[in-house]
Image (cartoon, rainbow, N blue to C red):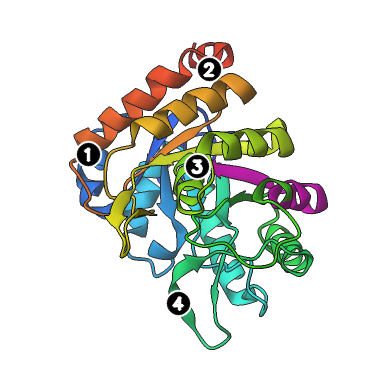
Amino acid sequence: MARSVFADGHAAAASGPLQGVGVGLRYPHHEQVLASPGAVDFFEIHAENYLSGIALDDALEIRRSTPLSIHATGLSLGSAHGVSREHVERIAGLCALLEPAQVSDHISWSDTGGGHVPDLLPLPYTEEALDVCAVAIQQVQDGLRRRILVENPSRYLAYAEADFSEAQFLAELVDRTGCGVLLDLNNILVSASNLGLSPASELRRLLSAVPAEAIGELHVAGHAIEPIAGGGTLRIDDHGSAVSADVWHMLDTTTRTIGARPVLVEWDTNIPAFETLCAEASKARHIVSAIPEYARAAC
C-alpha cells in the first residue's frame, strides 16, 4: 500500500500488517507520546472515543510515526436489530483519515433497539446467533471495504442453550465471512474461570478450531478478582491492573503454537503512568521474541 502524505508533505507510517507489541492509546498519555514517539510498535485506539473529533488531531499526529489499529466497541455485532449503517459509515470515515492497519470489534451485543447499554454482553452460541453475527460482520466488512477481526468476549454465566462451543462459533464465523479473529487471552482466562472450566483447555480448543492464519492479533490485560456471596470468586474483565502470570503463560503457549502475532497490552481503568504500560509491553516482547518469525520481522 502506498504511503499517505499529509497536507504538509509529511508521509504517514505505512499501513501494512501490524507487527510487534503495542499498547492502548489513552488520553492522559497523548502529550508524552507526541513528545517521544517510537516507545512501542503500534497503538490501538477505541473508535468511539474519536468519532466526535475530540483528540482526533492527536491521533493524526501520532499516526505519522506509529501504526494504529482501531478497536470498536459499539458495532453490536450480535444485536438482533442488526448493525447501524450510520455507525459503520462513521467508522469508515475514521478509517479513511487514520488508515489503521486493523479494525476489530467484539462478538457481543449492546444495542437494545432503543439505545445502547454500557457493556459488551455475550451471546448464546446458537445457530440463530451465528446467523445474526455472520450477516452483521459481512455488512461491516462491506461498509469498511476491509476484513475485520472479531474478539472473543469475557463471560460471567453460561446460557442454557448452545449449539456450539465458543471455539466452534468463532471458527464458523471465520468460515462464513472470511473475518479474522482477535484472540483475547485474558478473556479466555476470565470466562473459563467464571464458568468452572479449565483456561488451558479452552485455549487449546480455540487454537485447534480456529485456523491459525485467521488469528490476526492477541490481547493481554489484567482483571479483578471479587468474592461472591456463598464463597468463591468472580473474575471481572476490568483492564485495571498488570497482566497476570497466567495470561503471560497463555501468551507463551499461543505464540509457540501458532507463531508470532501482534500483541496488544490493554489497560483501560486505573490508568498507570505510560512507563508502566511500556514495561508491560516489554514483558510481552520478551515472550514473543523467542518465536523465530518475530525475530526475523524485527531485523
Callout 1: helix, strand or loop?
helix
Amino acid type, callout 4: Val
Mark 3 belongs to which amino acid?
Val
Pointer 4 or 2: first along the chain: 4
Report the magenta residues as a range: 169-183
Find numbered disc 4 in the image and state the secondary structure of the residue it sits on. Answer: strand
Residue 175 x %, y %: 80, 47
Rendered image quadrant of residue 277: top left
Question: Quarter-wise, where is residue 214 in the image?
Answer: top right
Residue beneath the point at 32% across and 46% down: 267
Q: Position of residue 146 (x, y in %)?
A: 69, 51
Q: Return the x and y of residue 105 as percentages of the image width and height.
A: 56, 56
Position of residue 172 measured from the top left corner of the image (x, y, whole percent):
77, 50
Among numbered discs 3 and 2, the one appearing first in the sequence = 3
Q: Which residue is mark 4?
A: 117
Please tell me how crowded label 4 is: few (under 14), some (14-19), or many (20+) other residues with Cα within 10 Å. Answer: few
Q: Which dot marks residue 294?
A: 2
Residue at image x 57%, y 62%?
Answer: 158
Q: Nearer the viewer, mark 3 or mark 2?
A: 2
Residue named by callout 3: 5
Q: CA distance from mark 1 to mark 2?
A: 24 Å
CB within 8 Å, label 3 to label 4:
no
| Disc 4 from disc 2: Cα separation | 39 Å
